[in-house]
Amino acid sequence: MRILFFAHLKDVTRCAELDLACGDVDTDGLWRKIINEHPGLEPFRGSVRLAKNSEYVGSDARFTDSDEVALIPPVSGG
Amino acid sequence: MRILFFAHLKDVTRCAELDLACGDVDTDGLWRKIINEHPGLEPFRGSVRLAKNSEYVGSDARFTDSDEVALIPPVSGG
Amino acid sequence: MQIEIQITTLPVPAPLPPPPLTGAGAWVEFRGIVRGEENGQLIAALEYEAYLPMAEREMRCILEELAGQRPCLFAKVIHRVGVIPAGETAIYAGVAGRHRAEAFALLTGFMDRLKRDVPIWKCRALTADNLAKLQAP
Amino acid sequence: MQIEIQITTLPVPAPLPPPPLTGAGAWVEFRGIVRGEENGQLIAALEYEAYLPMAEREMRCILEELAGQRPCLFAKVIHRVGVIPAGETAIYAGVAGRHRAEAFALLTGFMDRLKRDVPIWKCRALTADNLAKLQAP
């Protein structure tokens, strides 16, 4: 699974993306995997939305290794 | 007193302005004078606002012969 | 707030550059364009007339009054009068503010008031034939 | 509704011509300009980043959704990313509609949603020194 980080999350992870083998996971499982790799992301979990293949997903989403997942911190465009 | 007509009021009066000696009059007195000259304006009185020297005035206004008075039908700019 | 107002028979320039204003974070522009129909009839142009000194004065008063509630940095208004062909701009209004909320509020508030209080009138619609006759030498 | 979206590192062209659209009576444009201060500090530029395919897709979805409630004829959005000097345009959005009410509603609604949902970030503010170093050969 390809996981993308943006904005200040990149300062935490020190990378823009991460390849992670997750199998078939739900949102909780995914977050556990991600925080396991980058514990510094834990405090941001509450404010970060997840996108799967360029679309926001809710807490009932499921993810597989072929998905591109993005961690979307609060946006500030415009 | 110089009295100005705009838009469809000009079609009624067949002129854009009128010089009228009124003395010192209130709104009622002024309308009587104007309708006396152009009886066709009577039906428009309810929808026309009066401006004195380029400013809207209320029904308590007074007018003298040195004023420029404009009859302002409902506007439609923009 | 800096205010510029023009009432003119000339075409409104198509693109106007944003004002180079310190502190401006938002620049909102509106163009009211003459549509090719009026009350369901095809038309080629509209003719506008204005009570000139009062229209300018009234626009300035409205802008100043609205800016009292919604401080902005700059407003520019151009209202064209005379015969305006369909597809061309009848009114241009641009407002710069620190943030977009006040710039949009001032601009939409101004347009509402303009259509209620500013002595400018669409005095007639012209068909293609009427317009051709007017434009003939 | 016709939609054009660009996310680009290039400067947004200063003046954009109104679209020659049959039936358009209103053309509203917004520019969000980088201000020379951020949180009370003087700055020389802001750096923006975007999650590109999603940002474009999200902008298109928002425009289509809003146009369902407020039918308009045309919308064009340009969001600049990378380093944007103070005084330059970060976002340009233009909407044409039959009447001004729906064009303003679509444009302000779009900007509200953009600032909530479109994955674009101001990732840092640059001082004049930072900017000079970046621009040095």
Image (spheres, coloured by chain):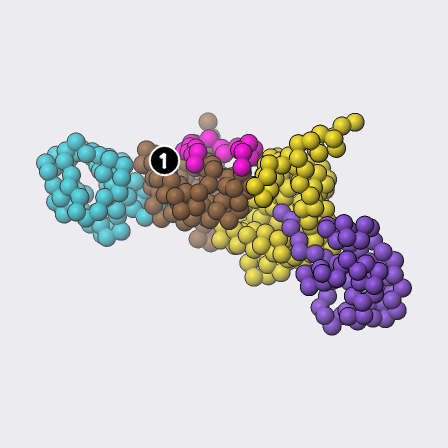
Chain colours: A purple, B cyan, C brown, D yellow
* Prevailing secondary structure class for the magenta stretch in the rendered image: loop
Q: Amino acid at mark 1?
A: Glu
Question: Is A16 inside the magenta-drawn segment?
Answer: no
Residue B47 x, y percent position in the rendering = 27, 51
Q: Is residue D8 left or right of residue C21?
A: right
Q: Residue at x 62, y 60 (%)?
A: D65
> In the rendered view, would you say D68 is above or below D22?
below
Residue, disc 1: C56
Q: Nearer the viewer, residue C38 or D62?
A: D62
Q: Is residue C72 visible?
A: yes
Q: Could you tell me which quadrant the N terminus of chain D lies in?
A: bottom right
Q: Residue at x 26, y 43 (%)?
A: B56
Q: Could you tell me which quadrant the C terminus of chain D lies in?
A: top right
Range drawn in magenta: C1-23
> In the rendered view, would you say C18 is above or below D112?
above
Q: Residue at x 46, y 41 (%)?
A: C72
